[in-house]
């Protein structure tokens, strides 16, 4: 069969098929990364863009593909398959589709390898680009993230479609006839997306709790079971990152970049302008399968609440402590233990931080990672220190308050933290640069203490007392009845 | 040589017309464009690289791939936009057809003008429907996405039959086969035309628009 094919043709054809297989894998895996692909057209050929298409080479994917091929080429009975599967965060997995690059026996002897076959392979790759966006797994892969991820697996040999469930559909991407057989590219995809709950869990794979695992080197990456896929979430490492795969790019052979306009009947291979420079394959850098870390690990949520922050002693609460309100504020914000000193509770009262304040209290939030951390619900102060119940002493002097009062709203129990404090600007008041202006006055005396006689406890007490003492009083009044009458007469 | 003719039909909502047409036209053009040719001595040439771009549709659950060329995109968008306006202005029935024709130029001697010989014509028939409520629109989004997927598979199927393609031209002939006006890619010579059908089904206004640089008649 090969006798009709010149050695140069055979060599070219093998090279085309090999790089076609590698590019096919790249297109499929990149289409399942979950991102939109964008490459640029270039009017000057660079020599490394096989099939005149700008398809990036992810080194890890090339490595996996070469490993699967193990130096062979897709041939009759030896298909290269890319299996795309979905894995949930609970560890269940499901095969979604299998892309097969096969070769059958139907040969096209008359076709010109370096010209027609090459161009048709190029068209087939374009078709693959289009079809990979059409199968159902594309939409799934665009939405991958916390709930599930998309994995790929490359294998060589017999096509296995049993994992696709019942009623799977097949779409043929295209065929290209060559003198040694017909290259066929097709996709079998699952239509029954109901989850197979009886599928056994992967034996030694780590539990995929959250997406964090994916972006770091999993400790058991080199011992991954053969049927476990690679995640389709590669992000290109920085330029400086050599990685174990840096050498793979260099080893790529320069692809055909030059064509002849001579009529097809002439043999093109004898044309001296034909640029095909075979280079030795660079085998040195193939190390273990280390997943190059892509994103930095997603940080654990910054669950910083006031309670968790380290408890630093507050400001001493001295008289002049108020003027050091900057530092005091920070400590107040982090304080989770109730201040015992009443003056300190005044500090707590006056240092409540509000949003939209004139003087943004950056000192408070600087210590916490969360914005508006000061609004995080803090532990309720015990009642004895609640200024509403036990009013603070009157402020020692007005001036130290000026710096801090503008940022205040009323303190209270923790429930008031939920409200957004707006700076209080009473009508007709002057700009509050002056001490003790209207706003200040309002705030200061906004929550006056309850009148003693109005407090329930005391009033009920007095009522009881009154009732008790009533008979005595009546007796006294009766005794003095004459005096009362004289008094009334005097008034009239 | 016979001209290959393919017909695709889609039923869409008014606001989906533009994206549906772009998706199909770009898919076809992706397969019918190559990199820029650079001719060298001894009758050889090298071919530039074609980049690709994923485009998400806003009104359809669909993503298509187009050639990475802003110039080409502008030309196609302009044509589709004119088609869409014509559809809107034609009346409530909303049936029309947009055609993408690939042709070769054959130089004739003076005084005859060059001939344009089509070798492949794609006709996309559009049927515009009006939907009553948001739920129907949501269903339509998904359904039209699926339909477009089927159409893309149809397109790919036809193209991969590898039927007639013009021969690769020599440098002097390249403008008879390819549109060399773009900076970054080189599609086969093409033209886009459209027709609007009225409710009676007859072609009321056969509007021909030439959207590529034609060689002028004499």
Image (tube, coloured by chain):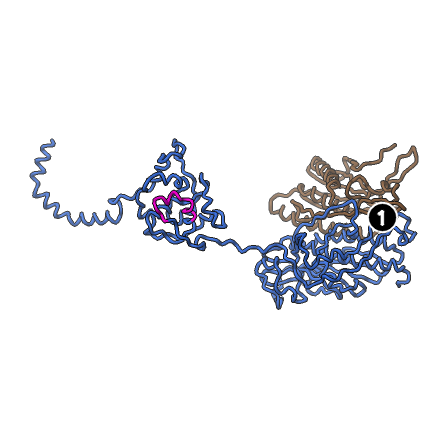
Chain colours: A blue, B brown
Assign a secondary structure to mark 1.
loop
Q: Relative to the observer, which residue lies in front, A278 or A61?
A: A278
Residue B204 lies, in percent from the top left, at: 76, 35
Dividing the image into 4 quarters, which one contains the N terminus of chain A?
bottom right
Q: Is residue B164 above or below residue A213?
A: above
The residue at 91%/34% (across/down) is B112
Residue A373 image point, x, y percent: 46, 49
According to the picture, the residue beneath numbered tag 1 turns out to be B165
Q: How crowded is mark 1: few (under 14 residues within 10 Å), some or many (20 or more)?
A: few
Q: Which of B171 and A478 is in front in this view?
A: B171
Residue A192 seen from this side: no
Q: Where is residue A248 in the image (x, y as percent from the top left)?
A: 73, 58
Q: Main secondary structure of the magenta part?
A: helix
Could you tell me residue B12's position as x and y percent? 69, 44
Quadrant into which the C terminus of chain A falls = top left
Residue A323 lies in the magenta stretch: yes
The correct choice, above or below, for A190 with respect to A271 in the image is below
Between B2 and A446, which is closer to the camera in this rendering? A446
Which residues, given as a range, are shown in magenta?
A316-330
Residue B63: say if magenta.
no
User: Can residue A469 be seen at all in this image of the molecule?
Assistant: yes
Q: Quadrant for residue A280, please give it.
A: bottom right
């Amino acid at each position: 069969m090969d006798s009709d094919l010149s050695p140069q043709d055979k060599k070219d054809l093998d090279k085309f098929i090999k790089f076609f297989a590698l590019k096919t894998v790249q297109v499929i895996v990149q289409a399942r990364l979950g991102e939109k692909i964008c490459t640029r057209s270039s009017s000057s050929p660079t020599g490394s863009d096989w099939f005149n298409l700008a398809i990036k080479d992810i080194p890890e994917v090339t490595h996996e593909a070469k490993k699967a091929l193990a130096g062979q080429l897709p041939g009759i009975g030896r298909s290269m398959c890319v299996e795309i599967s979905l894995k949930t965060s609970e560890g269940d997995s499901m095969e979604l589709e299998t892309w097969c690059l096969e070769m059958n026996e139907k040969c096209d002897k008359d076709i010109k390898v370096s010209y027609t076959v090459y161009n048709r392979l190029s068209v087939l790759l374009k078709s693959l680009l289009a079809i990979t966006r059409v199968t159902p797994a594309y939409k799934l892969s665009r939405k991958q993230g916390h709930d599930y991820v998309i994995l790929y697996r490359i294998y060589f040999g017999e096509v296995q479609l049993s994992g696709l469930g019942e009623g799977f559909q097949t779409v043929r991407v295209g065929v290209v006839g060559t003198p040694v057989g017909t290259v066929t590219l097709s996709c079998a995809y699952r239509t029954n997306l109901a989850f197979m709950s009886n599928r056994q869990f992967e034996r030694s794979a780590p539990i995929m709790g959250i997406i964090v695992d994916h972006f770091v080197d999993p400790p058991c990456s080199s011992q991954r079971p053969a049927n476990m896929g690679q995640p389709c979430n590669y992000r290109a490492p920085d330029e400086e990152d050599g990685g174990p795969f840096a050498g793979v790019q260099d080893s790529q052979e320069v692809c055909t970049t030059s064509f002849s306009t001579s009529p097809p009947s002439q043999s093109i291979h004898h044309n001296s302008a034909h640029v095909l420079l075979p280079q030795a394959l660079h085998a040195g850098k193939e190390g273990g399968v280390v997943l190059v870390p892509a994103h930095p690990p997603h940080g654990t949520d910054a669950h910083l609440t006031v309670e968790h922050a380290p408890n630093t002693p507050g400001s001493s609460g001295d008289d002049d402590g108020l003027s050091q309100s900057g530092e005091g504020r920070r400590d107040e914000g982090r304080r989770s233990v109730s201040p015992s000193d009443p003056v300190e509770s005044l500090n707590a009262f006056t240092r409540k931080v509000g949003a939209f304040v004139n003087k943004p209290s950056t000192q408070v939030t600087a210590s916490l990672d969360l914005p508006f951390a000061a609004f995080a619900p803090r532990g309720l102060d015990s009642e004895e220190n609640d200024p509403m119940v036990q009013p603070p002493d009157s402020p020692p002097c007005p001036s130290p308050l000026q710096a801090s009062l503008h940022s205040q709203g009323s303190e209270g129990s923790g429930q008031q933290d939920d409200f957004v404090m707006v700076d209080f600007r009473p009508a007709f008041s002057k700009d509050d640069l002056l001490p003790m202006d209207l706003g200040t006055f309002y705030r200061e005396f906004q929550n006056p203490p309850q009148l003693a006689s109005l407090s329930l406890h005391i009033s009920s007490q007095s009522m009881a007392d009154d009732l008790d003492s009533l008979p005595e009083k009546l007796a006294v009044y009766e005794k003095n009845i004459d005096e009362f009458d004289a008094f009334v007469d005097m008034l009239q | 040589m016979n001209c290959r003719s393919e017909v695709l039909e889609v039923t869409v909502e008014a606001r989906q017309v533009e994206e549906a047409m772009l998706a199909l036209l770009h898919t076809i053009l992706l397969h019918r464009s190559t990199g820029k040719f650079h001719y060298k001595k001894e009758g050889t040439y090298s071919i530039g690289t074609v980049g690709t771009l994923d485009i998400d549709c806003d009104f359809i659950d669909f993503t298509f791939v187009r050639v990475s060329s802003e110039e080409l995109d502008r030309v196609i968008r302009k044509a589709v936009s004119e088609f869409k306006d014509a559809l809107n202005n034609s009346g409530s029935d909303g049936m029309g057809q947009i055609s993408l024709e690939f042709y070769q130029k054959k130089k004739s001697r003076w005084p005859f003008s060059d001939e344009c010989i089509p070798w492949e014509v794609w006709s996309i028939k559009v049927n515009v429907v009006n939907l009553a409520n948001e739920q129907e629109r949501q269903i339509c989004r998904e359904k039209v996405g699926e339909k477009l997927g089927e159409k893309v598979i149809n397109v790919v199927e036809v193209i991969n039959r590898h039927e007639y393609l013009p021969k690769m031209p020599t440098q002097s002939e390249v403008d008879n086969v390819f549109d060399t006006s773009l900076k970054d890619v080189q599609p086969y010579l093409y033209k886009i035309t459209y027709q609007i059908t009225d409710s009676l089904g007859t072609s009321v206004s056969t509007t021909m628009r030439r959207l590529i640089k034609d060689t002028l008649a004499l």
